[in-house]
């Protein structure tokens, strides 16, 4: 009997289009191969293991042939839609196991042949609904995870009353978290905006965060409060699958409403069709070697100067529409900010996601309150005081003049 085991297997890029979006995957395994090998060639312990008496040997996980130098490229596939196992056709043919002989514990759930990147594979897939019907082991479940275990196997093939070909049995396991939904009696304001975008059969997770400065190392942990004219540093990134899709920001705008499509209140455009629509907007390099141009990486950094609307409320929400592009079609992801190209105009609408973040509040600098009353009223009061004093002096002078004149008239009459 041949048993396979493998734990914490690293997935290659070729697996991305089928299973890199293991949004629910926490682990997978398959049992070790105990195939026959040639002791004389068993010199590499990473591919071949000698017995204690060194009279026999076996190939380690995923390798086969007399020299244990051939890789079966086994992959356990655990996605939100199905679970399964695949290996190269050559591995099964080495053990004289055609695709028609491979199946899960229920023979009706058979394997199929599929060619990936010009390499033929034998593969078996099953959904969660088909799991028990195809012979899955009793589901193991606790408060946090559910464990699914299946076996890909062959039936013994007899010649007369003897069997010469080994029986293949490949056990594999997928572990999924148990998803529980709860509700709270109060509103939670997110400090990270997240959206899911489906591209063909894949689902990608995109996040938008605001950072405290140009280094993009410390994100805001609560609703940000920023001074007028200060820079607002924004990061938009594809978190799952990482480093696969190219990311393009199509439109970004600020509005007084948390609802992106709400026509109530004021709004202001920052980016339009991937191009700058506010002259304070600028994209930043991710590193000295990696440019941060729109549509050319999986993470984008951009900033704009803080502002407020002329009418209350002065706080606002940031909304951005984003799209994902296949790395093989990178040119289609670059925005044409000079004019709309014919290719871009004729291209079908790409998959888009909407991210909303906020509220972003205005910070009022803490300055001492200036006494306008004293700076304005006191000089005026001073003017009136001086004016009153001059009026009094002039009146007194005039009264004195009249009294002096009357005295002189009396003296002349005497």
Image (cartoon, rainbow, N blue to C red):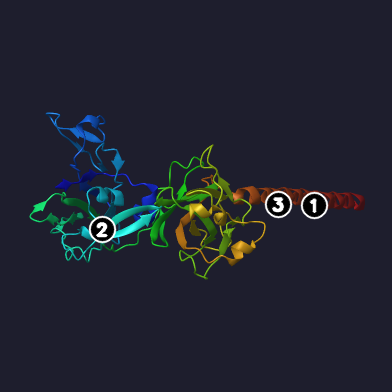
Q: Is residue 52 visible?
A: yes
Q: Is residue 150 visible?
A: no
Q: Is residue 163 above or below residue 41?
A: below
Residue 247 position, x and y percent, is 49, 53
**Residue extending furthest toward the left:** 161
Q: Residues within 10 Å of mark 3 (few under 14, many from 20)?
A: few
Q: Secondary structure at mark 1?
A: helix
Q: Secondary structure at mark 3?
A: helix
* Residue occupying the point 80% across, 48% down: 397
Q: Residues within 10 Å of mark 1 (few under 14, many from 20)?
A: few
Q: Is residue 97 left or right of residue 187?
A: left
Which badge, 1 or 2, comes first in the chain's sequence? 2
Mark-to-mark CA distance, 3 and 1: 22 Å
Is 342 in front, or is 229? 342
Is 241 in front, or is 2? 2
Residue at the disc numbered 2 = 99
Is 247 in front, or is 5? 5
Question: In terms of image quadrants, where is residue 39?
Answer: top left
* Residue occupying the point 20% across, 34% down: 49
Residue 3 position, x and y percent, is 17, 46
**Residue extending furthest toward the front:** 160
Which badge, 2 or 3, comes first in the chain's sequence? 2
Residue at the disc numbered 1 = 399
Residue 384: mark in rendering: 3
Q: Is residue 394 left or right of residue 106?
A: right
Q: Is residue 34 left or right of residue 356?
A: left
Q: Is residue 187 above or below residue 396?
A: below
Is 31 in front, or is 94? 94
Residue 364 position, x and y percent, is 52, 50
Q: Secondary structure at mark 2?
A: helix
């Amino acid at each position: 009997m041949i048993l396979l085991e493998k734990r914490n297997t690293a997935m290659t890029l070729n697996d991305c289009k089928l299973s890199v979006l293991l949004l629910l995957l926490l682990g997978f395994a398959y049992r070790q191969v105990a195939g026959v090998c040639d002791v004389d060639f068993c010199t590499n312990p990473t591919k071949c293991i000698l017995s204690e008496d060194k009279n026999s040997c076996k190939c380690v996980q995923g390798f086969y042939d007399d020299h244990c130098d051939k890789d079966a490229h086994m992959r356990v596939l655990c996605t939100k839609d199905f679970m399964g196992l695949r290996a190269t056709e050559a591995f099964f043919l080495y053990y004289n196991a055609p695709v028609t002989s491979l199946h899960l514990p229920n023979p009706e759930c058979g394997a199929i042949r599929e060619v990936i990147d010009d390499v033929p594979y034998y593969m078996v897939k099953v959904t969660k609904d088909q799991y028990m019907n195809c012979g899955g082991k009793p589901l193991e479940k606790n408060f946090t995870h559910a464990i699914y275990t299946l076996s890909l196997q062959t039936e013994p093939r007899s010649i007369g009353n003897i069997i010469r070909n080994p029986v293949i049995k490949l056990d594999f396991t997928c572990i999924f978290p148990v998803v529980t939904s709860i509700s709270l009696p109060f509103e939670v304001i997110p400090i990270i905006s997240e959206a899911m975008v489906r591209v063909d059969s894949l689902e990608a997770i995109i996040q938008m965060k605001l950072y405290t400065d140009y280094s993009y190392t410390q994100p805001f942990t609560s609703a940000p409060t920023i001074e007028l004219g200060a820079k607002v540093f924004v990061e938009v990134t594809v978190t799952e699958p990482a480093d696969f899709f190219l990311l393009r920001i199509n439109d970004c705008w600020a509005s007084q409403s948390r609802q992106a499509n709400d026509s109530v209140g004021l709004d202001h455009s920052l980016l339009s069709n991937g191009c700058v629509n506010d002259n304070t907007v600028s994209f930043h390099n991710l590193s000295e070697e990696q440019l941060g141009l729109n549509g050319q990486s999986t993470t984008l950094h951009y900033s704009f100067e803080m502002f407020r609307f002329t009418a209350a409320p002065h706080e606002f929400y940031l909304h951005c529409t984003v799209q994902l592009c296949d790395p093989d079609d990178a040119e289609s992801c670059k925005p044409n900010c000079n004019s709309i190209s014919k290719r871009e105009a004729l291209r079908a609408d790409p998959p888009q996601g909407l991210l909303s973040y906020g509220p972003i509040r205005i910070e009022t600098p803490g300055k001492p309150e200036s006494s306008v009353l004293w700076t304005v009223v006191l000089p005026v009061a001073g003017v009136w005081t001086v004016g009153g004093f001059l009026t009094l002096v002039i009146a007194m002078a005039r009264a004195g003049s009249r009294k002096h004149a009357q005295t002189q008239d009396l003296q002349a009459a005497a």
